[in-house]
Image (cartoon, rainbow, N blue to C red):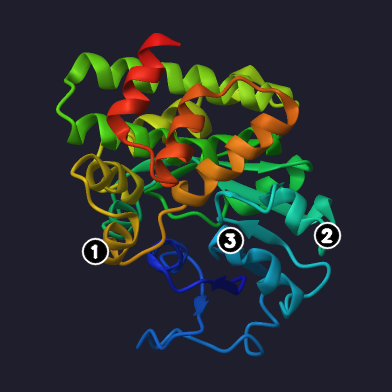
Amino acid sequence: MPKISVFGGGAWGKALHFAFSQTNPCYIVSRKDLAMQSQITPQEAQDSDFFIVAIASSALHSWLETSPLPKQAKILVASKGIAQGQFVSEIFEKFYPHSKLCFLAGPSFAKEVQNSFPCALNVHTSEISNAKEWLSLFPNFIKPYACSDVIGGEIGGAYKNVIAIASGICEGMNLGNNARASLVARGLVEMTRFGKYFGAQDSTFLGLSGAGDLFLTANSILSRNFRVGIGLAFGKTLPKILEEIGEIAEGVKTSQEIYAISQKYGIYTPIAKEVALIMEGKNPKESLNDLMTS
């Protein structure tokens, strides 16, 4: 049986470790002590057959600079977000051949994965044969699909966190179901427009990696980004909200990254713009007015 090592000891990393350990020898690597028998050092993970990376996107570049993964390693990237104006795939391709890289996307709360609740996910890659190697490793409560649209998958996985913050703000301001449904629907249109600019396929945003992940993340209190939005609507400071959540909410930085990229290329992204401005201190009520009147 192949040996799998998961890098990243956060909620998502631990959930993926749990999932893949159902059918394979699976280990986890983290800088912090997880008090898990299956935790190993980066050096001990060297001889793994497959590697899963669930590191926060903001820390990926610095982590990869010292990463011990073999150059021809089979890597499944579970990180989501945009960092320093670069997509996750662009960051990885500086260090590893793109033909060896796969990217995980789709609706999947860590807590529900750890409870073995059923879900379906996409494995995006430029080489479908690589994705098919991964498909056989998933547990029976996850239905995986191979997909060739790498950029579409990662834009969906990053952008949905931004829309989830906006949706949480909508919920926290008690604007009603009509408003939230309208916001999420327009968010799907917005992320699709953004993705198509970079060559993504329309169909990706209508599937698991787009609408599926968006509808999940933008409609549940289990979503960290949704809770960030609720906290902002209640008038809490961003540092206080993140302290209460206790984990990284990728949408906070991703909103600013998307807004900067949109300004650079002239892409119309009104929701991401307002979320980014709220992160900088704009009153959510002013953002609501600007979205309704622009």
The residue under label 1 is which amino acid type? Glu
Secondary structure type for disc 1: helix
Question: Which residue matches tag 3?
Answer: 58
The residue under label 2 is which amino acid type? Lys
Secondary structure type for disc 3: helix
Label pair 1/2, CB-CB below 8 angstroms: no
Q: Residue at x 60, y 44 (%)?
A: 257
Q: Residues within 10 Å of mark 1 (few under 14, many from 20)?
A: few
At which x and y percent is residue 139? Answer: 44, 55
Q: Residue at x 52, y 34 (%)?
A: 209
Q: Residue at x 51, y 31 (%)?
A: 273
At which x and y percent is residue 65? Answer: 75, 74
At which x and y percent is residue 49? Answer: 68, 71
Residue at far top of view: 293
Frontmost of labels 1 and 2 is 1
Question: Which residue matches tag 1?
Answer: 244
Classify residue 71 by image quadrant: bottom right
At which x and y percent is residue 235? Answer: 21, 46
Q: Earlier in the sequence, mark 1 or mark 3?
A: 3
Frontmost of labels 3 and 2 is 3
As rendered, which of 20 and 56 lies closer to the eye? 56
Question: Which residue matches tag 2?
Answer: 94
Classify residue 154 by image quadrant: top right
As rendered, which of 247 and 96 lies closer to the eye? 247
